[in-house]
Image: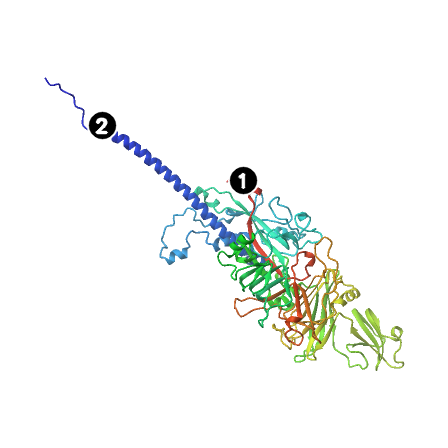
Amino acid sequence: MESKRKRAPRGYASYVTVLTLGIIVLVMLLNSYRTSIRAHAAQKEVTLRIDYADKEDEILRAVVNLTPNRAIRAMTHESDATSASRNPLRWGNIFSDALDQVNARESVATAMLNNFGLQDARVANTGDTAFPNVNAVFDAIEPESGYVAPGIGRSLGAGFPAPLETANVDIINDDRVFPIISRQKIYGPLAAGEVGLPVDEYPEFNLISFPEIRFSYTEPGQPFVAKRNWWAFSLDLADADDHLTGLDRMERDFIISIYEIPSQLAISAEAFAILGQHEDGSMWENASVEGAVFATRAKVEEGMDLSRISGRRGLEFGDGVKIDSKAVASDPFAPGVREKFEIDYGEFLPVSLASEAGRAAFLPINRGPDFFDRYSHSPETNTVSPTTWNDYSVGAMQCAMRLDVTEVAGEFDKTPTELRFQYFKGGTRQSVDISLIPDPATGLPPGYIYCCDEDEMVNFPYPVDVAYGKNGSYYYEEAVVGDITFNNARFGDPLVGTFKAGYFKPSFPWNVSLLHEEKWCIEIYPERFKKFLELLGGDSLAVNHSVAVNVDHRSNADIAKPSIPCAEHDYGVILKECADLTSFTEGFSLVTNLRLYIADDFNTATIPPPAGSGIPDPFYPPSSLFAPEKRYGAETNPLRLKIGGQVGSLAGDTGESGQKVHLLDLRDATEADMAHDRIEVNLTQIRHPEALPPITMMNWLIMVEERRAEFYVAQSP
């Protein structure tokens, strides 16, 4: 008998298996999905951080470009006249314009979308924002308020540069709002110990460390002569949208600086300079260059050996050029050249362009021909900075003393008939007009001028030589000043029984003469200024340390504006009695827009170097000569020429290859090129502010650097 078995429903075991496996697979899928979501979130955060970091870097570069422009505009005429002229110069607007300049307010530019016909596209970028509140992105470092914390008037603590100081309260207040550059900002007690030299001796320019950038103006970390203006701020581009992106970032602290750098290199050429070769193709002879070189553009010819060189637009090397006595390829910027140099010699190749310095820009302050001429500029008023742009950047306007041709004989007769001399007395500028109209009196030496009849009194506010008499019989006195009565009681009677007269001849450290019997020139005698100013009661040569020689073409229609290049009918300046400048305790400078003839030995008397300065002997009073053209010799030509110090050019560079400057192509007074074998040139770099002359060219180095993390104020991300 067969047993009957109870049969289970079909598929029961399959259901359990499938359900179990399904749950396992689902869990795995969920885990995979969760891992993928986390990976996507992490990738999103990384991408956002990279995007914000790239944007911030571009914004900082834009700030570097905008800041010097606004600082210059703050020094120009009417910059403080209206809110329309003033507002663009504010830090808030500088930062806002930086956001616009790099298109940081949108991920894809509207113009680009329109060009591709995507104007209706929906941009799904949660970090795309208009930044209506710039202060949410930029703000002064804690606990300061506003956009920046200026480095002036107080120390901000560790990690910040040495602060500047000023007695001008307006500068302290305005520096929080605008980038202020002013000669009234100096180093004071707050910077003591943080700069290289005593601040009471060197308040304007001191020794500070060159920043850690690969720009070969000088070696990073080494002291150089400069003044550093700086402002500190914090930046966090993500902060405005963290509620949308969920991205928390710690704001970073930055310092933007404008280094004011007086020209101090062996060669500083705001031009396309040819180094190592004369225009006729011959190589430089008897020429040595110690220290760094800067040029807008430069072609370094074969055989040159330079310590370091930097440029703005381009550098080109010939075969066999050496840098610091080390061979360099003809194209120093070719891929691998600098890396190979660093491997071979264990140091960075000191050849660079300003554009390679990252968040930095180098700006030579070059006014071109305007640098030499005061009368090319109108007065500047209503400026945000108390230092106006022309006073800051025009050498002729910075000179303490001024000598101008103000009157001439007529429209077609350019004989000077009046000069105006200005100088400082008690800190106030004084002005004296000097007539040069000759008197036809007979028997007087050249240059004497009639002033009065017998028994009359004349007041001379400046030293003069005087004569008293008639018809070839005269008595003389030299270097008199004040009230002079021309009578027998004072002078004696040179011609009894004759009614006599008084005459004077200026006893000045200058003269008017004809060069080669055809060119009117102003002769300048620097060695005579000390006694002359003492007789005037003027300030010492520590104040009256520089002289500008110009012609007043603005007020007198009979005086033409000098041409550059100089024309033969223009006036000239002849420098004489200039070998011993030791009376100029702060140095001597001359600036003119006329052709300058150096007729005598110039600055050949030495003085002791400042104690502890490290300046080697022989040391000469620091001096500078600025003129559009220089000639060596006047009535006679020199047999040999020896030049030491620094040379430069303001010729400018338009980028056209034909406009080249050959710095050592020199001419004598007859316009002939001087034989190259009769020229010896030893160029050196200034390494101490004591060696700066009164008038110099100025350069700006603008850079942004991040404050080192160890100096941050503790803050939550």
Q: Mark 1, mark 2: which one is toward the viewer?
A: 2
Task: State the scheme by which the image is colored.
Answer: rainbow
Q: Quadrant for residue 529, please give it.
A: bottom right
Answer above or below: position of 394 versus 140. below
Answer above or below: position of 417 versus 715. below
The structure residue drawn at horizontal position 28% and vertical position 30%, both measured from the top left corner, is: 20
Q: Please give the label number shown on residue 13.
A: 2
Residue farthest along the top direction in this orientation:
1
Nearer the N terminus, badge 1 or badge 2?
2
Quarter of the image for the N terminus: give it: top left
> Real-space Cα distance between discs 1 and 2?
62 Å
Residue 283 visible in image: yes
- Please tell me which residue lies in front, 93 or 29: 29
Image position, residue 470 (x, y; %): 84, 80
Amino acid type, mark 1 = Gln
Answer above or below: position of 610 versus 637. above
Image position, residue 479 (x, y; %): 81, 70
Q: Quadrant for residue 596, please give it.
A: bottom right
Q: Is residue 45 left or right of residue 439?
A: left
Amino acid type, mark 2 = Ala
Residue with the mark numbered 1 = 715
Mark 2 element type? helix
- Please tell me which residue lies in front, 36 or 639: 639
Image position, residue 287 (x, y; %): 64, 65
Image position, residue 99 (x, y; %): 49, 52
The structure residue drawn at horizontal position 28% and vertical position 32%, both measured from the top left corner, is: 21
- Please tell me which residue lies in front, 485 or 375: 375
